[in-house]
């Protein structure tokens, strides 16, 4: 059927949680009610990436980009654009700088420096329709792998691409595959790590939600390259939408003869099963993940032997994350040399980041390796919200460090980030502004690591707990100079002695904030002051008697009843005496500060 229009509805988790499904259903309902069902195809896609503006609707061929859409807007979109051929101007995205309507996606600053390889189909195709994936070169690379290339040729193509593992370590993908191909075993296994437990990270989840077949094709390719006949996707049960779409995609691939026995008549057998994780961060570590897939408690084991030699059920196993596998179909279809043209000398291709925090345009961002932090934060991300001052950006989640303004013009690649006290990680990127307290940030990440540590090794189990206690001590105003030395000493010991990289990198946020913001730690210790006002124990609300008119609103709002009027005799020139806060009883809740219209209350 030839359609005149196509309506693409974002079906990622963020938009789904904001009535995205309801919008999609309303559009279908309105198309039928207005007798234009045969003129417009309405498709629910994966994530568009521009999460800050969701729910998002895109109408083709006009390239109309509608943002913050509501279910009740469906009737107007159909009536105006599909029936009358007129855009709904009020829904079009407008750039903050020009306040002009975006006539196409290319006009939107958020997308202008992006280059989509992994996310190439997200927001473009229906992830539950295998035909749409095939129409965009899907499974075309697999045809070469099955019928034209040897195992060595496939691995050589991956080597030419320069692809390194996107799970965080950056190990050369081809080398891992080749080691496993050469390893001896009764069986070999392919595992996709879709656990993704970093706070603020949702790259892998969104890739599966928007383009599950790219991951499946990548896993089949890996299976053929190493001689494996069984794959597993390890995904946390907290991602129901991704799981549902993955199940649909697996069933479709089986129905099309792309999974199972004798794939496409090639003589090669390969199948994929889903294993649900319970949300343990430590299971992102490959040996802990293997234990969990086997049905055991997810705890790391010493290496060597490495999984490529002895992994799942003591057989040779490769583990790559979602983003790594999603690159493979592009490499096999376009050639490794095509991907190698992107990125830097040692870090080829692109990287997907979940850009969140105090940035105007949060969302999924895919850029060539070598793009600077400044380009991501201030050009793609649109800068800091509310005109605040940039403070830092946390890359690599709980395992990474905070990079400051002096690092904004550094190219983003594996080596550069590591050399500057952070790491690539899986791709979380959390932006902080002047209102963030580095002690509080370090405490948050360490609290996360304490909760997620499996407890198997002492450096991690004891070290994370001790660092957390020291950070809490400093945040409460009880810190001492030697606490900084203790934090650095314990952090260094954990880095060297922990069994896995959870403990080996857990101290990074603390160590990087001490290195870059030592003066803030000293303020907490010496001045008993938190300049950002995040450490409640150090916060102090005071009422300026000269500005206070004695209205008593602050006292009425106070849940602790610790605000009372001063002795009127002390202020004979005032109609009503000013109020004062009993600091010993104050909860530091800030209700008085928020309630005062005369700005007579200060915090600091």
Image (cartoon, rainbow, N blue to C red):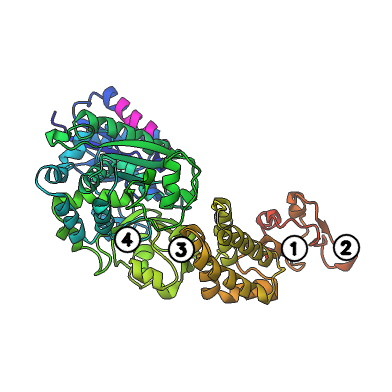
> Residue 400, labelled with which disc?
3
Residue 116 horizontal/vertical position (percent): 25, 53
Question: In the image, which is nearer the foreground, mark 4 or mark 1?
Answer: 4
The numbered mark, 2 or 3, whose residue comes first in the sequence reads 3
> Residue 568, labelled with which disc?
2
> Residue 548, labelled with which disc?
1
Decide: is 299 above or below 375: above
Q: Quadrant of the C terminus?
A: bottom right
Do residues under tags 1 and 3 come within 8 Å of each other at their CB atoms?
no
Alpha-carbon distance for marks 1 and 2? 13 Å
Query: 169 or 354: which is nearer to us?
Result: 169
Alpha-carbon distance for marks 4 and 3? 17 Å
Can residue 119 be seen by looking at this rendering?
no
Is 284 displayed left or right of 579 in the figure? left
Do residues under tags 2 and 3 come within 8 Å of each other at their CB atoms?
no
Residue 574 occupies which quadrant of the picture? bottom right
Residue occupied by mark 4: 171
Alpha-carbon distance for marks 1 and 3? 46 Å
The numbered mark, 4 or 2, whose residue comes first in the sequence reads 4
């Amino acid at each position: 059927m030839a359609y005149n229009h196509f309506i693409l509805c974002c079906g990622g988790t963020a938009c789904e949680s904001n009535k995205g499904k309801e919008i999609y259903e309303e559009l279908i309902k309105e198309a039928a009610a207005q007798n234009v069902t045969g003129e417009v195809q309405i498709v629910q896609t994966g994530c568009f990436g521009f999460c800050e503006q969701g729910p998002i609707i895109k109408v083709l061929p006009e390239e109309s980009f509608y943002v913050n859409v509501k279910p009740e807007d469906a009737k107007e979109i159909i009536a105006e654009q599909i029936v009358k051929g007129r855009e709904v101007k009020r829904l079009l995205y407008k750039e903050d700088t020009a306040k002009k309507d975006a006539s196409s996606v290319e006009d939107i600053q958020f997308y202008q420096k992006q280059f989509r390889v992994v996310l190439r189909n997200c927001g473009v195709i229906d992830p539950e329709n295998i035909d749409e994936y095939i129409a965009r070169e899907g499974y075309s690379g697999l045809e070469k792998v099955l019928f034209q290339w040897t195992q060595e040729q496939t691995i050589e193509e991956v080597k030419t691409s320069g692809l390194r593992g996107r799970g965080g370590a950056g190990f050369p993908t081809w080398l891992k595959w080749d080691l496993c191909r050469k390893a001896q075993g009764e069986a070999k296994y392919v595992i996709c790590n879709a656990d993704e437990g970093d706070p603020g990270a949702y790259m892998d989840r969104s890739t599966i939600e928007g383009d599950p077949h790219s991951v499946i094709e990548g896993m089949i390719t890996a299976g053929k390259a190493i001689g494996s006949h069984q794959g597993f996707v390890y995904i946390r049960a907290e991602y129901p939408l991704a799981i549902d779409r993955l199940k649909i995609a697996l069933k479709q691939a089986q129905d099309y003869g792309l999974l199972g026995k004798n794939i496409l008549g090639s003589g090669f057998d390969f199948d994929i099963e889903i294993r649900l994780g319970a949300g343990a961060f430590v299971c992102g570590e490959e040996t802990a993940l293997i234990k969990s897939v086997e049905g055991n408690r997810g705890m790391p084991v010493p290496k060597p032997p490495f999984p490529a030699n002895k992994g799942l059920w003591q057989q040779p196993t490769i583990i790559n994350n979602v983003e790594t596998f999603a690159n493979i179909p592009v490499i096999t279809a376009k050639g490794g040399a095509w991907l190698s043209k992107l990125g830097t000398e040692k870090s080829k291709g692109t990287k997907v980041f979940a850009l969140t925090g105090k940035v105007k345009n949060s969302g999924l961002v895919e850029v060539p390796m070598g793009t600077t932090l400044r380009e991501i934060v201030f050009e793609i991300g649109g800068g800091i919200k509310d005109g605040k001052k940039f403070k830092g950006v946390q890359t690599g989640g709980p395992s990474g460090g905070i990079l400051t303004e002096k690092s904004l013009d550094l190219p983003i690649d594996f080596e550069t980030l590591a050399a500057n006290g952070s790491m690539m990680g899986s791709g979380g990127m959390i932006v902080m502004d002047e209102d963030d307290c580095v002690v509080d940030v370090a405490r948050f990440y360490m609290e996360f690591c304490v909760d997620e540590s499996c407890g198997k090794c002492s450096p991690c189990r004891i070290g994370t707990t001790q660092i957390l206690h020291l950070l809490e001590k400093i945040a409460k105003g009880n810190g001492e100079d030697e606490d900084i030395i203790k934090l650095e000493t314990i952090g260094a010991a954990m880095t060297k002695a922990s069994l896995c990289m959870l403990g080996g990198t857990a101290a990074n946020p603390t160590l990087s904030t001490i290195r870059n913001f030592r003066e803030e730690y000293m303020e907490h210790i010496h001045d008993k002051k938190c300049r950002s006002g995040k450490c409640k124990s150090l916060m102090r609300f005071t009422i300026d008697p000269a500005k206070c008119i004695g209205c008593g609103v602050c006292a009425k709002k106070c849940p602790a009843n610790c605000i009372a009027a001063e002795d009127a005799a002390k202020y004979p020139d005032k109609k009503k005496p000013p109020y004062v806060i009993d600091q010993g009883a104050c909860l530091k809740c800030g209700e008085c500060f928020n309630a005062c219209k005369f700005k007579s209350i200060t915090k600091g």
